[in-house]
Image (cartoon, helix red, strand yellow):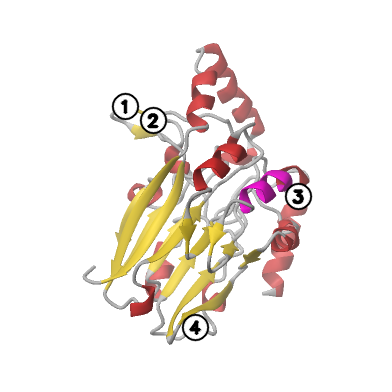
Amino acid sequence: MEDLRLKRKSIELGHLEAWLTKGRGSFHFENLTSLHSLLGGVLRFTGLRRRGERNALRPVIRETRFSFAFLPQRFSGFKILHLSDIHADGLPGLAERICEMIDGLEVDLCLLNGDYRFEVYGPSHNVYYNMEKIFSHIKSRGGVYGILGNHDFAEKVPVLEQMGVKMLINESLELQNGQDRVWLVGLDDPHYYGCDDLPGALKNVPEDGFKILLVHTPEMIKEADEEGINLYLCGHTHGGQICFPLIGPVWLNANCPRKYARAGKWRYGNVQGYTSAGVGSSCVAARFLCPPEIGLIELHRGEE
């Protein structure tokens, strides 16, 4: 665990130069700021920039239901607010819009899938005001839990925990409802940093326990299946963010089969999973044919 912390810190210190592969990603588009500027320039030149920004400020609430034969009975009907890739400082007005949409939602648990800020370099303090604003509108009976993404530095962890978020960095914890229990497992970012440790995080989890895995990207599906994960929640890809008619997303930025990187529900072996389109935008604050989403996931016991 300590070796992984040192690895992450060393990558953070050289983040501007170290854009080549560190983790599972084959290419790190987020770290090439010149390409971001080029994409932004193309949108301005074509007159699409403002429309893209308007689209990025119109998140939808996407409800998804999962059924598991071995879900503990008292967790049937369990509701999860799933927020991924918030990038809360990337577009003025986004945090306020998120607050409006989640204000009336009452859930059993809130899970944050990483990438809280827009940039991948520099200090993180600019995002905290908006994150605190969003947290003040979350109504979660079982608390708020989060992980780090590839846009996040480890310095965020104590600050977010002061705001009431329990951060899971290659850790697990037991969630109890009466006599029934499930385990929530959270990993460090596998895409850029490569500091994930799934076996270590599962060290104190019973082999036959029901496991919910929170990891930033869909790139660990094979390992998750081998380790008996039941539900895999991730984001990172933004569903492509900018999609085209008929073609769909051009770039999904994940080293895994395309069907797991596209936004939505999927299955790999015995693992059921969901890849969020994210509620924020990355690289350029614009979306086309891929609306930002606030996830509302409901678990049920029954036939899968």
Q: Which residue appears at 48% of the width and 58% of the height?
A: 106
Question: Residue 298's x, y, as percent?
Answer: 36, 61
Question: On the rendered structure, is 166 left or right of 70?
Answer: right
| Badge 1 vs badge 3, beta-carbon distance below 8 Å | no
Q: Which residue appears at 36% of the width and 47% of the height?
A: 258
Q: Residues within 10 Å of mark 4 (few under 14, many from 20)?
A: many
Q: Earlier in the sequence, mark 2 or mark 3?
A: 3
The residue where tag 1 is placed is 245
Magenta segment, prevailing SS (helix, strand or loop): helix
Question: Residue 69's x, y, as percent?
Answer: 26, 75
Q: CA distance from mark 4 to mark 1?
A: 44 Å
Q: Earlier in the sequence, mark 1 or mark 2?
A: 1
| Badge 4 vs badge 3, beta-carbon distance below 8 Å | no
Q: Earlier in the sequence, mark 4 or mark 3?
A: 3
Q: Which residues are magenta?
A: 128-135
Q: Residues within 10 Å of mark 3 (few under 14, many from 20)?
A: few
Q: Which residue appears at 58% of the width and 54% of the height?
A: 114
Q: CA distance from mark 4 to mark 3?
A: 35 Å
- Name the element at disc 2: loop
